[in-house]
Image (tube, rainbow, N blue to C red):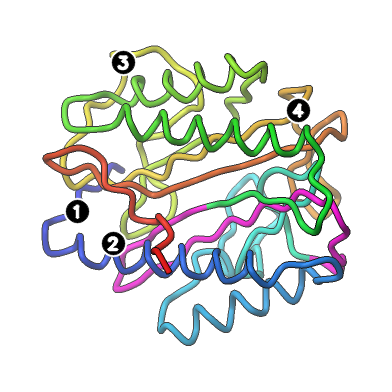
Amino acid sequence: MIEILSPTQLPRAREAGALVADILQTLKGRCEVGTNLLDIDRWAQAMIVEAGASSCYVDYAPSFGRGPFGHYICTSVNDAVLHGLPHDYALADGDLLSLDLAVSVGGVVADSAISFIVGDSKPAESVALIAATERALAAGIAAAGPGARIGDISHAIGTTLQSAGYSVNTQFGGHGVGSTMHQDPHVSNTGRPGRGYKLRPGLLLALEPWIMADTDELITDEDGWTLRSKTGCRTAHSEHTIAITEDGAEILTLPRQA
């Protein structure tokens, strides 16, 4: 299903996006060496509940996971790139942590992910991975707008990642959002320009480039959820929810200025 929001729904989308961005930035500020992934999950739960929002993850049980997910945020560390199930792990100096969060406010969903390095160590490979996904995300957003097509976004993302030397896995990618977290259209992280669904004002898309340092193959962790690089290499993931407007793409999950 492809869902187009009415003008009266867009303020709720903006509210959901602002909440997701605020929670992610708050969590990033709290994450330090020794922070437990389960504490991150509890902090996310508390902020979602306090805001009167609804988690998109707790009861989520898709075919690719051993559901329901049962937690409020995805916490993916180092070789884990997607759907990281929070567990009893204390973050170490130099860990690459990806946080992925989706909430619903007033019946409209926003979805975003950030990757960052914990502590004082800044491994060059991790810095490069994060920067590549952020550049690809910016390129995908720049390619979005009324009259553009999904393939234009996919091509912009894929070209950016591949030019940085990374291969692209197409099993998971971006997607439509609206009253539910995962909707059509699918937004692959590589594709051909001029192809696919034509973007319309009112369409919400979650764009999410993610990469692994030296492979494009995933394995599923024993927890039934966490997706890891097959080689054990490091990974990164960046995501924004955007709204297609008459003027272009509005980023709904952009952190607000302090």
Placement of 212 over or under 68, stated as above or below: above
**Residue 5 disc label:** 1
What amino acid is at disc 2?
Ala
Q: What residue span does the magenta drawing correspond to?
A: 87-112
Which tag, 1 or 2, sits closer to the chain's start? 1
Q: Is residue 219 magenta?
A: no
* Image point (63%, 25%), residue name: 169
The image position of residue 19, as x and y in percent, is 42, 70
Q: Is residue 95 magenta?
A: yes
Mark 3 vs mark 2, foreground winner is: 2
**Label 1 element class:** loop
**In terms of sequence position, does the residue under pointer 3 or pointer 2 come before the other?**
2
First in sequence, mark 3 or 4: give its number.
Answer: 3
Asked if marks 1 and 2 touch (Cβ < 8 Å), the reply is yes
Counting other residues with Cα less than 10 Å from the Cα at mark 2, is it few (<14), some (14-19), or many (20 or more)?
A: many
Q: Nearer the viewer, mark 4 or mark 2?
A: 4
Q: CA distance from mark 1 to mark 2?
A: 9 Å
Reading the image, the residue beneath label 4 is 213
Q: CA distance from mark 3 to mark 4?
A: 28 Å
Q: Type of residue at label 3? A: Arg
